[in-house]
Amino acid sequence: MSYGNMNIPRKDGMDRKDEEEMNIYDNVDPINGSDVKTETENSQTPQHTGSDTVRNRSSRAALVCLVLLCVVLLTAVIVLFVHIKTESTNYTEETKLLLLTKISNLTEARDELLTRNMQLTKERDGFSSSNLELIKHRDQLNMEKNELSESLRVKDRWIYYNSSLYFISSEKKSWTESRRYCTERGADLIIINNTEEQGFVKKISSDVKVWIGGTDRDVQGTWKWVDGSTLNSGFWASREPNGGTVEDCALNYGPGLADYPCNDAFQWICEEAILK
């Protein structure tokens, strides 16, 4: 008995034909109905398109251009360097001479500026010194002004004229007593230094006779002021002095100075110098 063509049943109830049909259905996509294995194999096959070829050609062209550009730039740098080197060699001496001349001129100008600066510094120091002196002088004048104001406040009826204070009495005394009155107040009998001051004395005394600080008591015939200076002969009136040994003290009146006995009583003028 031959069993070659017989379909022997399988234990799971399926024969060979049924198994083959099942294998066919296992390879079919249940949704799309396509062969899964075939599509998988197709998807794994690389796809080569024309755009990839164009891209590769463009990249190679750009690289070539870049290399050429680098070569051109390098050539230009070399040429420029050679040109500069050549030109600098050609005019080095001329340029050096020109620069030396400019340096010399600038040095002279600098020296002149330094000299001028020193001069200005000296002038500035001189001005500063003068300014200090002026400040001191101003302070001195202010102090004297204050002293004068205080003196005028304390001394009633004293007159200020040409840096001095003058007092004319209303009573009459001898020459000695008149001088004592003045010295007790920090002054002395007036000393007439010039014709302007003599005119001032005539004005404040109304041309009446007033004792002044002239006498020849120490040396007869030698007239001196109370400060020891010589009495100028130009101040005397005509034919004065003429009293000899009995008229040893000087007074002032309209015509000028005259000598009188020292014990006679007259008004007097005191003088106190403010600016000494």
Image (tube, helix red, strand yellow):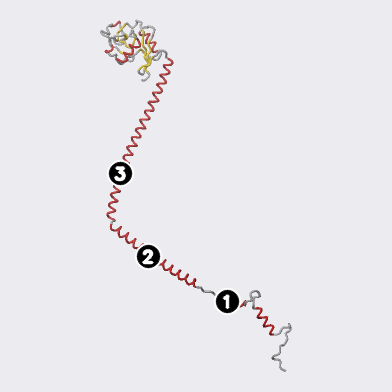
* 131 w.r.t. 31: above or below: above
Q: Residue furthest bottom?
A: 1
- What number is the disc on residue 72? 2
Q: Nearer the viewer, residue 101 or 237?
A: 101
Select label 3 or label 1 by which is in front.
1
Q: What residue type is labelled 3?
A: Ala
Which one is earlier in the sequence, the residue at label 2 or at label 1? 1
For the point 39% across and 67% down, the residue is: 68
* Residue position marked by numbered label 3 in the rendering: 109
Q: Work out how far the residue at label 2 is from the one at label 3, CA to CA, in angstroms.
A: 49 Å
Which one is earlier in the sequence, the residue at label 3 or at label 1? 1
Q: What element carries label 3?
A: helix
Q: Which residue lies furthest to the front in this view?
A: 32
Q: What element carries label 2?
A: helix
Q: Quadrant of residue 83?
A: bottom left
Q: Which of 153 and 266 is in front in this view?
A: 153
Where is residue 163 shown, x and y percent of the image? Answer: 36, 18
* Residue position marked by numbered label 1 in the rendering: 42
- What number is the disc on residue 169? none
Q: What residue type is labelled 2?
A: Val
Q: Is mark 1 on a helix, strand or loop?
A: helix
**Can you say which quadrant of the picture contains the C terminus?**
top left
Q: Which of 4 and 51 is in front in this view?
A: 51
For the point 43% across and 69% down, the residue is: 61
- Disc 2 vs disc 3: Cβ atoms closer than 8 Å? no
Q: Work out how far the residue at label 3 is from the one at label 1, CA to CA, in angstroms.
A: 94 Å
For the point 41% across and 67% down, the residue is: 65
Which one is earlier in the sequence, the residue at label 2 or at label 3? 2
Where is residue 226 shown, x and y percent of the image? Answer: 33, 13
Select label 2 or label 1 by which is in front.
1
The crowding category of the residue bearing disc 2, from other C-alpha atoms within 10 Å (few below 14, some 14 to 19, many at least 20), is: few
